[in-house]
Image: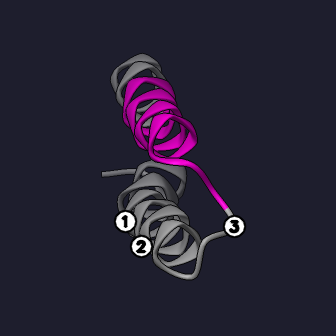
Amino acid sequence: MSDAQVGLVMATPLIIIFAVMLNRIGVLRPTGTIAAVAMSVVIATVLFLTQ
């Protein structure tokens, strides 16, 4: 795995956790949380596979 792929593997779960925590404290709506999680997974997958 390259350094960029390791960074993606480490950063994506942090983004997901951050979005869920923002949802729990009431900053993000559930649809915003779902969108943030889905898009971060899609972006990380695309970048991981193209590296």
Judge depth for marks 1 and 2 and give the one in front: 2
> Would residue 33 appear left or right of 25 to someone viewing this image?
left
Disc 1/disc 2 C-alpha distance (Å): 6 Å
Secondary structure, magenta segment, majority class: helix
Disc sitting over residue 31 in the figure:
none
What is the x, y in percent for residue 29?
57, 49
Residue beneath label 3, please? 27
Q: Is residue 13 above or below residue 36?
A: below
Judge depth for marks 1 and 3 and give the one in front: 3
Q: Is residue 48 above or below residue 29?
A: above
Name which residue type carries label 3: Val
Say what secondary structure mark 1 lies in. Answer: helix
Q: Residue at x 69, y 67 (%)?
A: 27
Determine whether label 1 and label 2 are within 8 Å by CB: yes
Q: Is residue 11 above or below residue 39?
A: below
- Of residue 14 and residue 45, the one placed in the foreground of this image is 14
Name which residue type carries label 1: Pro
Disc sitting over residue 17 in the figure:
2
- On whether residue 38 falls in the magenta region, the answer is yes
